[in-house]
Amino acid sequence: TEEAYTLEDALVVGCMLISLLKHADRVKIACMAQLLNALAPIMTEKGGPAWAQTIYYPYFFASVFGRGTALQLVTNSPGYETTHAKDTPFVDISGVHNEEDGTLSFFLVNRHTSETIETEVSLQGFATGSVIDHQVMTHPNLKAVNTAKNQDEVKPKKGEGASIADGKLTVKLPPYSYQMVRVKI
């Protein structure tokens, strides 16, 4: 049977892709089963519509804008305790410099259940830039899914408020959200 993916699944996929980019110096290739068969990020009905599942969007953004040199970002975020770690950060982030396009792409996840977290990213080493794209994916219901009848229930929307000042990118991350911010340098 085909799997319907939730916003929660999209956040997990976003975190997995962030992790792969963070470890690009060691992970040279990665395969994910969700790209084919019954776990596909695009759903169809025979003779009917086709629509993107929630997990499609993090894959899409990483595939199109995650090309170039992965940046080693030093992060500092409030965290929470899990059974596996005493201090798991609420915010996860990776970045990629595409020298050919003159862009930086940042992929961010906020895992906090209820708080918006304002995040600053130092653009040290890069010329002054401007935000050229900001996409935010969130929903009040972690279990929300896209269906044939409601294809746009969970999808990225144009973000507001990402800005650059004093060599820093500032962006607010709503609770349980995935974001992609692109900067032209």
Image (cartoon, rainbow, N blue to C red):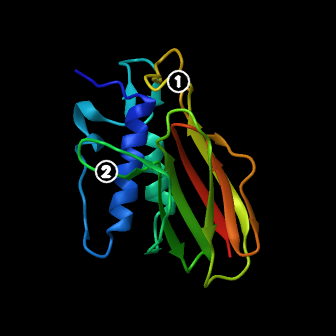
Residue 79 has which mark? none
Q: Amino acid at mark 1?
A: Gln
> Is 24 drawn above or below residue 6 in the view shown?
below
Q: Is 77 on the left-hand or right-hand side of 170?
A: left
Question: What residue appears at the point 69 percent right and 45 percent down from the top-left corner?
Answer: 159
The residue labelled by disc 2 is: 86
Label 2 residue SS: loop
User: Closer to us: mark 1 or mark 2?
Assistant: 2
Disc 2 residue crowd, few under 14, some 14–19, many 20+, Cα 10 Å:
few
Front residue of 25/167: it is: 167
For the question of whether residue 143 can be seen, the reply is yes
Front residue of 39/115: it is: 115
Separation of marks 1 and 2 at Cα, in angstroms? 38 Å
Q: Is 98 on the left-hand or right-hand side of 53?
A: right
Question: What residue appears at the point 71 percent right and 55 percent down from the top-left corner?
Answer: 162
Looking at the image, which residue sits at the far top?
149
> Is 43 drawn above or below residue 34 in the view shown?
above
Q: Residue 113's x, y, as percent?
A: 50, 33
Q: Quadrant of the C terminus?
A: bottom right
The residue labelled by disc 1 is: 151
Question: What residue appears at the point 35 percent right and 18 percent down from the top-left corner?
Answer: 46
Q: Is 63 on the left-hand or right-hand side of 169?
A: left
